[in-house]
Image (cartoon, rainbow, N blue to C red):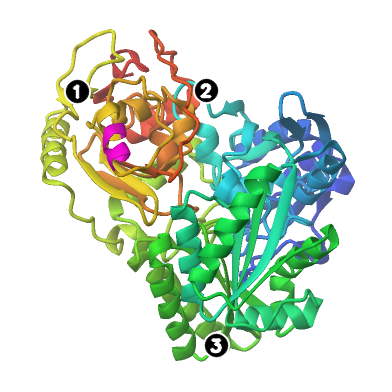
């Protein structure tokens, strides 16, 4: 698009003449990220003061100019590509670490503080920030949240969303909101995590910091096959031992890394980097368990780092895996599929077949504890045939992940590179809901447009999977009410409603569908009482972060956000919208960065946006801390973002909710 001269003058008045760049070098340098995508913006705007953001967005909104928030540009999905032209907002100058509060376990920073710089600032204080993507030396806090990129410690300490306490967030029209997980209404902070800048801009962040464990032990363990290494990880989780990190690499990766960094990696078919942390007495027991499990799975060697230098050398090799492959060819395409842990060996076998059939060279490394793997395919982007082969390979690998019950992104996002495959993973109904979420935040479609949601998905989206007959019956009833424009009052066991008026209930949905002690997930219908779920878990000798004193249903616990800590445990959700559409997100996967997080959307929505029919959540082999229960007698009114979501998702106000008077 052509930016009018009058608009460029207005931008220079607002930001300063040196902050508005239209020269070819600036446009070229901001026309790509770490993906093959290349799209030239019309201008690059450098933001030096966070207070410039709101008036800037207001101006861009008035002039209907698309914008792309850009930090380090390290993502691999084309999320920074200016598909519709417009302006790239260079946020890199917004990199101040404002303060560290060890007493309250938080740090406050601008969005473009480099993740590794925060880590270094915390070292002298004996604290650390849990998310540690391999790109932490260049990637930023805000960029990590926008992609929900988490790294090796995610298995034990949670993802970036879980470790973000607060975000000052600007909608595309320049309105400012402070978002926290515990706020009334949907978990909007969890919703913007992984949204890739398509819903707005992060202006400021508060992140969780933690004391470093007294003892950290790092091990380099080799196995005769990838399958043996993955089984060792599964056995570890089943034992109740949750490592600090579990990273796996195939032989091509370790050989390439060793030539590049001389990290001391042995030459073996599969290598695990395992890291434990904790108190010394417990660590001795954990190491014994770890050794026995590795031996059981045919370990070839088991080496412990003896010094901090040796430990850092091991991790230096893992962090250099991308750079090592990049040294072999002009371009590297990085995949990012996630599957249930039990499906990892079978999926990796299929991935190897795809790589061989397409005659490409690729290494495999993965977060073994999360089922999240990263094929790294080298090629020459100037040779069209190689580009086509790589694109075909990546898409086939992603489809294999979906076929295994997984997702096409665990932490790198969708951007433009994987947008088309979203129609393979999600149904028309779910993709339509993603579109409505986008519309609610960004009705003009100016914020990083044409990302995530596939074009023309209505005619080519995946078929809706069959639901439980009781869910289908409820959906049919809702469709009839929708056609008759008849409102519905919704409840589960009605334990948290002051007004007992109800004519739609999830009481018929009481099944405990699955307790999976391989993937350590439980799937239950929304009408199941929490006490019954806990009883079923105890019978299987597993545990969950559920409040034992809660007497209502699982659906009610999520819909009211009565136990906010439990929301971070959700990995999947099924719900019915007011028009009768059944939508699904996630499942038995520990990571999902494909699309907007519907678990966080429905959590705290009080039935205003949809009827939760089923959830999947994490379970554990060992007792977990019990979350705090917050039962409010009055429901706080909805904020403007919640109202915008309600208007898009249920425009007729057919789902009555205590969060909205008369459904309006």
Q: Which residue is mark 2?
A: 183
From what the image shows, is residue 664 above or below residue 346?
above
- Tell me if residue 175 can be seen: yes
Task: State the image coordinates of residue 195 (x, y, percent, origin top left).
Answer: 54, 47
- Give percent across and percent down for residue 337: 48, 65
Would residue 143 appear left or right of 644 to someone viewing this image? right
Q: Earlier in the sequence, mark 3 or mark 2?
A: 2
* Image quadrant in which the N terminus is located: bottom right
Label number found at residue 487: 1
Helix, strand or loop at disc 3? loop
Secondary structure mostly taken by the magenta-highlighted segment of the chain: helix
Q: Earlier in the sequence, mark 1 or mark 2?
A: 2
At 53% from the left edge and 50% from the top edge, which residue is drawn?
A: 241
Q: In the rendered image of this protein, does residue 598 appear above or below residue 196?
A: above
Expressed as whole percent of the image width and height from the top left, the position of residue 479 reads: 15, 37
Q: Distance of mark 3 from mark 2, alpha carbons?
A: 48 Å
Decide if residue 610 is in sight here: no
Is 140 situated above or below 227?
Answer: above
Highlighted range, magenta: 534-539
Q: Which residue is mark 3?
A: 360
Question: Magenta segment: does it hold 65?
Answer: no
Q: Residues within 10 Å of mark 1 (few under 14, many from 20)?
A: some
- Residue 516 or residue 109, whichever sits in front: 516
């Amino acid at each position: 698009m052509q930016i009018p001269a009058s608009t460029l003058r207005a931008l220079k008045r607002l930001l300063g003449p040196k902050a508005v760049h239209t020269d070819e070098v600036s446009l070229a340098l901001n026309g790509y990220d770490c993906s093959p995508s290349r799209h030239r913006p019309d201008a690059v705007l450098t933001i030096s003061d966070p207070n410039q953001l709101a008036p800037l967005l207001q101006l861009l909104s008035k002039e209907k100019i698309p914008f792309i928030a850009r930090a380090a540009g390290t993502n691999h999905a084309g999320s920074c590509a200016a598909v519709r032209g417009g302006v790239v907002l260079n946020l890199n100058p917004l990199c101040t670490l404002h303060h560290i509060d060890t007493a309250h376990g938080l740090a406050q920073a601008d969005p473009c503080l480099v993740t590794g710089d925060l880590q270094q600032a915390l070292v002298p204080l004996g604290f650390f920030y849990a998310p540690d993507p391999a790109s932490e030396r260049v990637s930023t806090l805000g960029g990590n949240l926008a992609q929900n990129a988490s790294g090796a410690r995610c298995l034990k300490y949670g993802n970036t969303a879980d470790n973000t306490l607060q975000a000052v967030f600007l909608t595309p029209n320049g309105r400012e909101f402070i978002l926290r997980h515990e706020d009334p209404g949907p978990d909007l902070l969890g919703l913007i995590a992984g949204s890739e800048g398509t819903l707005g801009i992060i202006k400021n962040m508060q992140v969780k910091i933690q004391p470093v464990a007294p003892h950290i032990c790092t091990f380099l363990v080799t196995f005769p096959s990838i399958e043996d290494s993955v089984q060792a990880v599964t056995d570890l989780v089943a034992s109740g031992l949750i490592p600090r990190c579990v990273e796996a690499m195939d032989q091509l990766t370790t050989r390439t890394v060793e030539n590049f960094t001389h990290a001391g990696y042995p030459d073996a078919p599969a290598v695990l980097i395992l890291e434990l942390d904790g108190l010394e007495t417990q660590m001795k027991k954990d190491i014994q368990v770890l050794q026995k499990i590795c031996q059981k799975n045919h370990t070839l060697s088991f080496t412990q780092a003896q010094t901090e230098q040796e430990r850092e050398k091991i991790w230096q090799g893992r962090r250099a895996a991308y750079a090592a492959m990049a040294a072999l060819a002009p371009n590297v395409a990085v995949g990012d599929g996630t599957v249930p842990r039990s499906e990892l060996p079978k999926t990796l076998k299929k991935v190897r077949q795809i790589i061989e059939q397409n005659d490409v060279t690729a290494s495999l490394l993965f977060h073994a504890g999360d089922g999240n793997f990263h094929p790294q395919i080298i090629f020459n982007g100037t040779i069209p045939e190689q580009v086509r082969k790589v694109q075909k390979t990546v898409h086939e690998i992603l489809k294999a992940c979906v076929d295994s019950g997984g997702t096409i992104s665990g932490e790198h996002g969708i951007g433009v590179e994987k947008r088309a495959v979203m129609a393979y993973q999600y149904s028309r109904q779910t993709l339509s809901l993603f579109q409505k979420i986008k519309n609610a935040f960004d009705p003009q479609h100016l914020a990083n447009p044409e990302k995530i949601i596939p074009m023309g998905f209505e005619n080519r989206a995946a078929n809706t999977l069959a639901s439980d007959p009781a869910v289908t019956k409820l959906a049919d009833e809702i469709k009839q009410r929708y056609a008759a424009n008849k409102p519905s009052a919704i409840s589960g066991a009605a334990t948290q409603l002051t007004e007992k008026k109800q004519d739609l209930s999830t009481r018929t949905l009481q099944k405990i569908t699955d307790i999976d002690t391989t993937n350590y997930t439980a799937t239950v219908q929304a009408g199941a009482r929490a006490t019954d779920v806990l009883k079923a878990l105890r019978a299987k000798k597993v545990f969950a972060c559920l409040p034992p004193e809660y007497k209502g249903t699982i659906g009610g616990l999520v819909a009211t956000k009565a136990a906010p800590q439990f929301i971070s445990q959700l990995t999947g959700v099924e719900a019915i919208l007011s028009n009768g559409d059944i939508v699904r997100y996630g499942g038995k996967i520990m990571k999902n960065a494909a699309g907007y997080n519907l678990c966080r959307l429905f959590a705290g929505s009080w039935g205003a946006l949809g009827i939760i029919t089923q959830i999947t959540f994490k379970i554990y082999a060992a007792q977990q801390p019990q979350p705090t229960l917050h039962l409010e007698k009055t429901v706080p009114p909805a904020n403007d973002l919640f109202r915008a979501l309600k208007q898009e998702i249920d425009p007729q106000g057919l789902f009555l909710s205590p969060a909205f008077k008369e459904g309006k």
